[in-house]
Image (cartoon, coloured by chain):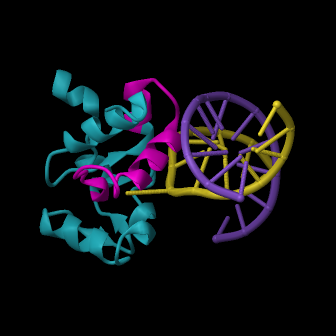
Chain colours: A cyan, B yellow, C purple
Amino acid sequence: MKKSHYFEQVYEVTRQIPAGRVSTYGAIADFLALGSARMVGWALNKSFSAEDVPAHRVVNRKGELSGRIHFPSPTMMEELLENEGIKIVDHKVCDFKKLLWKPAEELL
DNA sequence: CACTTGACAACAA
DNA sequence: CTTGTTGCCAAGT
């Protein structure tokens, strides 16, 4: 049952993010070429009610854990990321650009 | 049906 | 750092 097409797409892409990597709203939105970064964030918000989506691997364009506030605990996101080998400094991803993963990479 | 809000992007000042 | 704009589109009120 599809609620909304792009929701599923965002979930799918987000699930493709490998551990130890992060992605951005812009990257996903750009890859889907559907809506916009807002839609991605919005879809991720609903991801809690959806299937298991590693939303903690999705950050904003600055690498900030902007979504941590929506997690059960604001620190959970950092814990999860650090658990995957991602360094978090000041609620931001260290070497963000290096860890940045794009959906298109899977196609390469 | 109109308006506002939203885990945003990207730039400008 | 903040405040502002424009684009984008669905859900909530």
Image: C5 above or below A62 = above
Q: Position of residue A95 (x, y in %)?
A: 28, 57
On the image, which quarter does residue B12 sit in? top right
**Horizontally, is A82 left or right of A2 in the view?**
left
Residue A100 against residue A65 in the figure, above or below: above
Q: Main secondary structure of the magenta part?
A: helix
Q: Is residue A16 visible?
A: yes
For residue A5, which quarter of the picture?
top left
Q: Is residue A81 magenta?
A: no
Measuring from the top left, give residue C12's x and y in whole percent: 61, 54
Q: Nearer the viewer, residue A108 or A97?
A: A108
Residue A106: percent from left, percent from top: 17, 28
Question: Which quarter of the figure has residue A10?
Answer: top left
How many numbered badges does the structure rendering display?
0
| Residue found 22% across the figure and 64% down from its top | A81
Task: Kindly identify the residue that appears in the image at 43 percent across and 55 percent down.
Answer: A45
The residue nearer to you, when weighing A40 against A21, is A40
Q: Residue at x 35, y 78 (%)?
A: A73
**Quarter of the figure that contains the C terminus of chain A:** top left
- Residue A103: x %, y % from top left: 27, 32
Furthest toward the front, the residue is A1
Instruction: Name which residue lies at 41% across and 52% down.
Output: A46
Q: Is residue A107 left or right of residue B4?
A: left
Q: Is residue A72 above or below residue A45?
A: below
Is A40 inside the magenta-drawn segment? Answer: yes
Give the magenta part as a residue range: A27-56
